[in-house]
Amino acid sequence: MKQVALVLFGFLALGCASAEVTENRLGPLPADAKVILASVVIDTQGEVKSESDWIEAIQKGFRDEAEDLGIAGGPIPVEIRVTRCDPGSKAERFWVGFGAGAGHLESTVFVSGHGELVVVGSVSDGFLDGGSFGSVCEKAGRAAARAIGEARGK
């Protein structure tokens, strides 16, 4: 019982951050295809605070997942273009919860010569720390790399 309570508490403390591929228009890639992250660009209408932090988190997530999947270090360039980057309010997530202050990320991932995909992420809760938008960015990078890995050998 104590372990269940600790797991539940940990879940609430860290917040709910997620990212997933919502549109996958990638064509098949060769089974041995390897990619390189050429760029991450934030291309939104308004100014984005902490832009470099979010870019670094996306890069880290993509590179870590690509290495884990064995698709890193190749000649196929990948560009991630963030079209929505709204970190929301960490204070609202902490003090109010229940979706208040939610942060949202949307990006299009272009895989040169093979198509594109759309990755959407959000953070909506965070009991102790207000939830981390950086973790959404990292998960978005990981989701993009995973989808590319799944396209190999189709």
Image: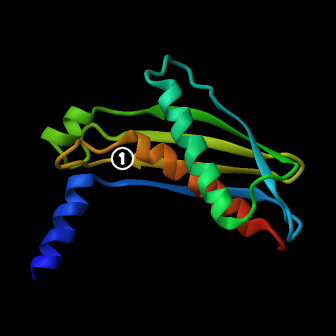
Farthest bottom residue?
A: 1
Residue sitting nearer the eye, 44 or 131: 131
Residue 79, image x, y percentages: 74, 39
Residue sitting nearer the eye, 57 or 148: 57
Farthest left residue?
A: 2
Residue 72, image x, y percentages: 74, 55
125 displayed left or right of 75: left
Quarter of the picture containing the N terminus is: bottom left
Residue at the disc numbered 1: 123
Residue 80, image x, y percentages: 68, 40
146 displayed left or right of 100: right
Q: Is residue 49 above or below residue 21?
A: above
Badge 1 density bin: few <14, some 14–19, many ≥20, Cα 10 Å: many
Name the residue rendered at 56%, 33% in the picture.
Answer: 55
Name the residue rendered at 22%, 43% in the picture.
Answer: 129
Residue sitting nearer the eye, 19 or 66: 66
In which quadrant of the rendered view does residue 58 lie?
top right
Hey, what amino acid is under mark 1? Val
In which quadrant of the rendered view does residue 148 lie?
bottom right
